[in-house]
Amino acid sequence: MREKKLRFIITFHTTTDAMAFEKHCLAAGLPGRLIPVPTSITAGCGMSWMADPADRAALEEAIKKDALKVDALYEVVH
Amino acid sequence: MIYLDNAATTYHKPQTVIDAVVSAMQGMGNSSRGSHSGALKAARTVYDARCKAAALFGCADPSRVIFTANSTEALNIAISGLFTAGDHIISTDLEHNSVLRPLYRLQAEEGISLDFVRADKQGCVDYGDFERLIRPETKAIVCNHASNLTGNMLDLARIGAICKVYGLLLVVDASQTAGCVPIDMEKMGISVLCFTGHKGLYGPQGTGGLCIAEGVEIRPFKVGGSGVQSFSKTQPVQYPTRLEAGTLNGHGIAGLAAAFDFISETGVEAIHAKEIALMRRFYEGVKDVDGVTVYGDFSTDERAAIVALNIKDYESGEVSDELSETYGIATRPGAHCAPRMHEALGTVEQGAVRFSFSYFNRSEEVDAAVAAVKEIAE
């Protein structure tokens, strides 16, 4: 297994919101990728966006500026 | 075979649609079920289709595009999820059973009340009737964009304006017009647009959906697997997951996405113009033939490319069978699931033979159909 380290995680209410987020990030050159939601955040299924905590500010700014639909933001060891 | 039954389903599909379905079946996982490459390919494909549907129909938010198996399922979701006991709904004589039966069921089981705007012998409505039927408890107008029997089109912008004045929802069955007639939900004031993928959009059977305007809340018709919020005992409230329990038809939706591309690249106006030209060629060829009765209003090109007719007092099924067996021409006879429309036209007993045209028909096929009608009428 890969070594665990601190990650910036964004969760979504729906897969559609995750897809819209991914599309936006790819177009804007924002870092990260979709992964299954870590169980330390919530049990069950669903997708989340994982990025380096160093990229948090850029991602948060995009969420605010472009009104991207997200559920919550976390920093967890994953 | 000369295929003139495109109001039932379009027979000739763009090769890109076929290729997209095959490609999806060769390498696509399940949308919203994990984040491996196959699942993500499916999720991206479905999201891409949502965006394309939203763009085509003027739906502001792609997450308010819900995929279903067809228009009937979309209409059932909308009608069963919007209305409750005591509501009054206005519909029209032009409707297909996909609108009528969900309404009749709510009338019988939930106590909603119904009124219908009547159609005359040409299948036309008096728009003043919509306003005359409005009562304090009226909740919505539910109607199609074009009759699947006559091809007559309703002026949705005019009906939408009435709905706006009286604060009503407008639920539209666009089965005969999605893809071949311009539709803009915002401009027309449509609250819920129900469409099928396999007719004018030239997509696969088993695809369709509904587009929901901002502020319109529909209770789930079914609940179940969603791929998100799995420990919640209730269906997620967010669209589209709220109304999409269970695995989507991802392979079909991949084809539908390609179909949306075909429509946008070809142009809805260009498709409509070609289909109407074929319809006019046929109509002009048969309308004055002795023994032929054509139904519907042909005074305008704002209509679907459909010509319904009868020959003398022949059973419509007999004529359709003769067209198929002797001439190799595919048409649809009978009642077309449109009982009130046949009552208005006076064709309950005889039914009618429906010729319906697609972008892929050719003028020589139309001419062969005209010649066949003339011969049968001799």
Image (cartoon, grey):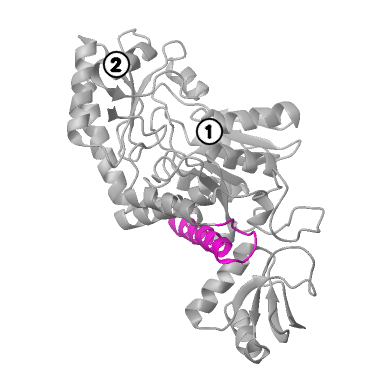
Left or right: residue A11 compared with residue B23: right
Q: Give the residue type that dot 1 points to.
A: Asp
Label 1 and label 2: CA atoms lie apart by 44 Å
Residue B291 rendering spot, x and y as whole percentages: 26, 11
Residue A68 in view of the camera: no
Range of magenta residues:
B29-58
Residue on which disc 2 sits: B325
Residue B178 rendering spot, x and y as whole percentages: 43, 45
Residue on which disc 1 sits: B129
Left or right: residue B186 compared with residue A71: left
Viewer-proximal residue among B291 and B62: B62
Q: Chain of mark 2?
A: B
Q: Give the residue type that dot 2 points to.
A: Glu
**In the image, residue B42 lies in the stretch drawn in magenta:** yes
Q: Residue furthest front?
A: A1
- Identify the residue shown where x is 66% and y is 63%: A14
